Amino acid sequence: MDFFGDYTLRLVALGSAVLGATSGALGSFAYLRRQSLLGDAVSHAALPGIALAFLFTGSKAPLVLMVGAGLAGWIGTLVVRAVVGRSRVPFDSALGIVLSVFFGLGLVLLTYIQKRPSAAQAGLDSFLFGQAASLLRRDVVTMTVLATAVLVVLVMLWKEFKLLSFDPDFASSLGLPIRRLDGLLTLLLVVAIVIGLQTVGVVLMSAMIVAPAAAARQWSRRLAPMVFLAAMIGVFSGVTGSVMSSTVPRLPTGPTIVLVLSAVVVVSLMLAPRRGLVWRFLRLGRLLRAPDLDPVLMHLFALSLQHPGDPDHGHSIAVLRTMSPGGADVGAALEGLADRGLARATGDGLWAPTAIGRREAERVLEREVES
Amino acid sequence: MSPELEIVLIAVVTAVAAALPGAYLVLRRTALVSDAISHAILPGIVVAFFFTRDLNSPLLLLAAAATGVLTVVLIEALIRSRLVPEDASIGLVFPALFSIGVILISRYAGGVHLDTDSVLLGELAFAPFDRLTMGGVDLGPRALWTMGAILLLNLVVISLVWKELKLATVDSSLAALLGFSPALIHYSLMTLVSITAVGAFDAVGSILVVALMIAPPATAYLVVDRFAPMMWLGALVAAVSAVLGYGVAFLFDVSIAGSMAAACGVLFSFAFWFAPRRGLLAQGRRRAAQRLDLGVRMLVVHLLHHQDTEAAPEECSLPRLHRHLKWSTGRTQQVVREAQQRLLLERSGELLRATDAGRRLAEAAIIGEFSILNS
């Protein structure tokens, strides 16, 4: 494979780089605003737009299809907003309804187009799973122009979007037009998704929004480095995945890009400094093996204070479990306390602190108060 | 039975089977787990297929259901690591698993009846051709038996743990305090969702699974308040969507699954607009009534303030009223008419005057304002 000599391959790589950069950057904002799955709804909702744009114009020009996709995706976000704002249907259900209903509508239209005698629809199918090899020069030009526009707006309104993402109430108190900014940021997300649809496909485009941001977030606590890194991860995965899929036969583009991305996410979750699972495991390994006794003892002590005259009153392990954070092994902790003579079982699943245990708990409490 | 009737029957059974566990997903705010599961079971199906080489093997269903549960385990593990928020965890896990499935199919399963389109979109139209025979006797389409069994399973499980599921859905802390393991209940439900998704996925494709699980219960949620009616109404809505969707697909010769999903959407928007009390129209009517009532109160307060004073001919005259209250003439007329009907004011020529009832209402309104201001 001669990367620099092969025109098609260069085109594919360029297109994927463009889509990776925009979806990484815009995805970071969606990720931080807890709207990761909005991308899923938007990309599925774009399908009927693509079909309708083709039905009305008979054209498969990238701009025509992208405008159709963008309009449908944008309408999808408006429907989600209306349903959440005007009814008690929760956000996630609204997303599920929009994504499946719009996608169903898209399927109906696609099958309708296929059945028409003039069947010049070939190529619309590639929007399901994406086909990097089908990228033409005009596609890449359109993608690049749109991506530049999106990124320019993002940079120009950087401070506003940052404020909107982290503290919308404060932003609103400064007199920023919150609703319009929110709409604009969502619109940019829609455009970023539309840019990638032909390459990645509607089914997996949502991963291009979530995964680069999730990976980048592990490495950075600050917005600007995170957005930049997410864009770079998007470029890397997009180019690697689409070039692989263009050179290896029967390797669909969307899934390949997503797998490269997922690998980057796994590595990031493992190795990220301080937060990474590997470091956490090394640091916490010892602590995890020995259950933390103090919190359970304190809970037991707190419960026994409710029965001042009855030191032998047993307290249910189920109650202690609900007082402890999920995942804590309360049973093991109680056994540990019993070994040390701080607590004892008074019945089936019932526990009480011993006299030593109560003194120990008071001591811990004093220490806490002092510090 | 004619093939058309068989398709409708399969569609209805599938729709009802999906809508039952869907009601819990909507209320537990885990609706998109259905999206995740219905996509992520693909690699399970493919890998099991490589072992059995038989698309009808029950092993496929089991493997897929297991993959569905594995998906939930992975998502929960990601959430618990606290490295990724909940929504992003879902968005990370299922595309990865689905991609593995798609790549496995397109690389290694060429030529067999297992292609990505039918996985995603379903091929309900072909379901009647795959028949279950026993001892040479035709028992009907296989999909009908599979989905019938799944529907029965859902009904049995849900009725057995009805109280527990309801409690865990409505108040999970109380359920935990009473000794029901939230994790056990959660995973049982997710197993049910996985099995249903697998069966439905085979018949109608993964996207329709999402439509059938979420949209009908959400539609019912707009109409009724109690849990049991919500579940039954959801099942009914799903069945109607199935029949409606098939009818449209049959008439225009388009994708059955897509058309059923669209029908779910149509019924949902119908409820969104027209549901009694919660629909947009009912909300609008209520708001208009409140606005009118507020207007009436303002009017009687205004009249009470000015009548029997020198300014009365100016302030309380019907043609000038709208300028003093800063209302449009239309609204002024509407409010005056309403107040007259409620016998709160009387009219002599152009001059309006609050009646005793109007006086009482105005005083109550003012006292109400004060008590709000002072509180």
Image: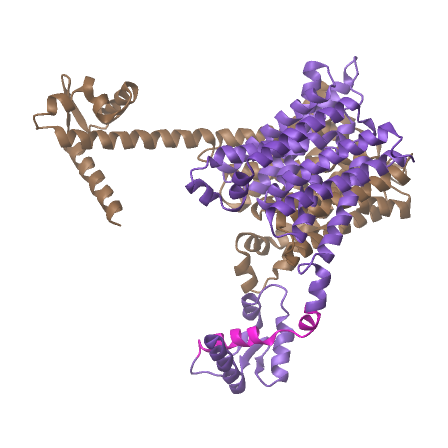
Determine the main secondary structure of the stretch shown in magenta: helix
Q: Quadrant of residue B18?
A: top right
What is the total number of numbered labels drawn onto the structure image?
A: 0
A289 drawn magenta:
yes
Residue at the location (11% across, 21% down)?
A: B313
Can residue A270 be seen in the rendering of this structure?
Answer: yes
Residue at the location (55% across, 60% down)?
A: B175
Q: Is A132 displayed left or right of B310 in the figure? A: right
Residue at the location (72% across, 34% down)?
A: A19
Asked whether B169 or A158 is in front, the reply is A158
Q: Is A353 displayed left or right of A45 in the figure? A: left
Q: Is residue B237 above or below residue A218?
A: above
B180 drawn magenta:
no
Q: Quadrant of residue B125?
A: top right
Q: Is B78 displayed left or right of B24 in the figure? A: right
Q: Is residue A292 above or below residue B270?
A: below
Can residue B241 be seen in the rendering of this structure?
Answer: no
Q: Position of residue A223 (x, y in %)?
A: 60, 47
| Segment colored magenta | A284-307
Q: Position of residue A332 (x, y in %)?
A: 65, 75
Q: Position of residue A203 (x, y in %)?
A: 73, 35
| Chain assigned brown | B
Q: Position of residue B94 (x, y in %)?
A: 72, 45
Q: Is residue A319 above or below residue A337?
A: above
Q: Is residue A176 above or below residue A271?
A: above
| Chain assigned purple | A
Residue at the location (61% across, 84% down)?
A: A340
